[in-house]
Image (tube, grey):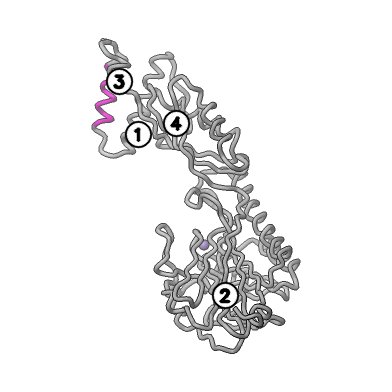
């Protein structure tokens, strides 16, 4: 590298996020309204923290690549919260390309809200180019309209060499890197937008972060969702810090760094239950072994082990113990019931006969759900026989 080139190298700093889904419903997670509200507050907290980082870094601009809101229509209060937060970021410019969940329709906050001067919302239809007021930079953006999901617009981007660093901002599916559980919306091939003169394409739609950098042309970045919404979005969630080094001589150099930012982490763990051990101990061991604050974690616990029936008291105890440590708990019962001889061998009792009958029904079950139901019925029956009382129905009822 020559000395002159080194000296004239300049940096552009970009904070790129997408897919926050503000005001999402968490009903599918099975949480109550209060926990849902806390999760919605966590989304806002993450939004505020990202903007604080943009101010402190400082970023030259912020790119929001769609699905900022979870719906096309949003509560006025939420739109006002976003507009106020973005206004406080001025003079740092913010560019938004509406996504498939928050399309630019006439009822959307994009059309209805008064956006501060430092915010540009890209409309659907055609690519729009905005030149940065100070930096040698041009942003090409396009929004979703809520009806066209063809992605045809990705073929229509034109970028001419004019000495500026060029960026694109949009929402869609780069075919070759679509995560297995994401829905295909607005598909395109990397080659369609990888122009020689386009340094970085800031995309949204994939909730798992992906960087596509092929053929040394355009870097295509998906930051993923910055705050998980379910156990599908487990582990650390991030936004991207993108640094573009450029000078008058060579092609710009793009560096992307994911920055963890989730307020509530969704994680999956396995919990081994043992005969004679209080599930509380298993939970305490788990809580100690993890890196992070359990009170800010939603955990899916897969209970395993081989235990004598009834099983559900162990599951209930595990759930109760975990709830006192974690923000939210979901327990999956994968415990195997200790069957047959050790439990009832040689007994000519009603209990033994009942156990054999239920074992046969479980063996005859045509699907896993029926099997679980029969096992649950057996556990209830055994408990009722032993305690001379019907056990209380609990949330572990597999049909509830
Ligand atoms: Mn999304």
**173 vs 103, nearest the viewer:** 173
Q: Secondary structure at mark 4?
A: strand
Q: Residue at x 47, y 69 (%)?
A: 212
**Mark 4 — residue?**
272
**233 vs 396, nearest the viewer:** 233
**Mark 3 — residue?**
355
Horizontal arrangement in the rendering, residue 320 relative to residue 274 (left or right): right
Q: Quadrant of the N terminus?
A: bottom right
Q: Measure the C-alpha gap from mark 2 to mark 4.
A: 49 Å
Q: Quadrant of the C terminus?
A: top left
Q: Quarter of the image holding residue 294?
A: top right
**Mark 2 — residue?**
253
- Region of the chain picked out in magenta, as a range: 353-363
Q: Measure the C-alpha gap from mark 3 to mark 2.
A: 69 Å
Give the label, 4 or 3, closer to the camera.
4
Tell me if residue 47 comes above or below residue 116 in the rendering. Answer: above
Q: Measure the C-alpha gap from mark 2 to mark 1.
A: 56 Å
Horizontal arrangement in the rendering, residue 366 relative to residue 25 (left or right): left
Tell me if residue 338 comes above or below residue 157 in the rendering. Answer: above
Q: Are marks 3 and 2 in contact (CB under 8 Å)?
A: no
Q: Indicate which disc, 3 or 2, sits on the residue closer to the N terminus.
A: 2
Q: Indicate which disc, 4 or 3, sits on the residue closer to the N terminus.
A: 4
Magenta part mainly helix, strand or loop? Answer: helix
Crowd tier of the residue under label 4, counting other residues whose Cα lies within 10 Å: few below 14, some 14–19, many 20 or above: some
Q: Indicate which disc, 1 or 3, sits on the residue closer to the N terminus.
A: 3
Residue 302 location in percent, x, y?
44, 37
Q: Secondary structure at mark 2?
A: strand
Give the label, 2 or 1, closer to the camera.
2
Q: Measure the C-alpha gap from mark 4 to mark 3.
A: 25 Å
Give the label, 1 or 4, closer to the camera.
4
Q: Are marks 4 and 3 in contact (CB under 8 Å)?
A: no
């Amino acid at each position: 590298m020559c000395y002159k080139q080194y000296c004239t190298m300049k940096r552009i700093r970009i904070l790129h996020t997408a897919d926050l889904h503000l005001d999402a419903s968490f009903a599918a997670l099975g949480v109550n309204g209060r926990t849902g509200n806390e999760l919605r507050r966590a989304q806002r907290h993450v939004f505020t923290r990202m903007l604080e980082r943009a101010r402190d870094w400082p970023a030259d601009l912020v790119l929001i690549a769609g699905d900022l809101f979870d719906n096309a229509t949003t509560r006025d209060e939420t739109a006002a919260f976003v507009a106020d937060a973005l206004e406080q970021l001025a003079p740092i410019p913010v560019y938004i390309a509406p996504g498939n969940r928050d399309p630019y329709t006439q009822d959307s906050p994009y059309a209805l809200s008064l956006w501060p001067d430092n915010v540009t919302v890209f409309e659907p239809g055609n690519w729009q180019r905005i030149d940065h007021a100070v930096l040698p930079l041009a942003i090409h953006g396009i929004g979703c309209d809520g009806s066209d999901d063809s992605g045809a617009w990705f073929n229509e981007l034109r970028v001419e060499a004019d000495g500026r660093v060029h960026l694109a901002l949009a929402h869609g599916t780069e075919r070759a890197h679509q995560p297995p559980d994401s829905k295909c919306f607005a598909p395109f091939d990397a080659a369609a937008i990888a122009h020689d003169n386009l340094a970085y394409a800031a995309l949204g739609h994939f909730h798992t972060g992906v960087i596509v950098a092929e053929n040394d042309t355009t870097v295509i970045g998906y930051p993923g969702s910055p705050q998980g919404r379910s156990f599908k979005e487990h582990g650390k969630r991030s936004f991207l810090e993108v640094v573009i080094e450029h000078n008058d001589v060579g092609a710009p150099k793009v560096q992307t760094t994911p920055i963890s930012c989730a307020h509530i982490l969704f994680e999956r763990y396995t919990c081994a239950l043992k005969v004679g051990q209080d599930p509380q101990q298993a939970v305490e061991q788990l809580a100690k072994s993890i890196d992070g604050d359990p009170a800010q974690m939603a955990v899916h616990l897969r209970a395993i082990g081989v235990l004598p029936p009834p099983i559900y008291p162990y599951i209930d105890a595990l759930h109760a113990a975990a709830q006192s440590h974690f923000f939210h708990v979901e327990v999956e019962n994968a415990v195997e019931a200790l069957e047959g001889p050790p439990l009832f061998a040689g007994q000519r009792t009603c209990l033994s006969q009942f156990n054999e009958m239920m074992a046969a029904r479980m063996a005859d079950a045509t699907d896993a759900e029926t099997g679980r139901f029969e096992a649950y019925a057996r556990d209830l029956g055994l408990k009722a026989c032993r305690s001379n009382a019907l056990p209380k129905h609990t949330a572990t009822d597999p049909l509830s």
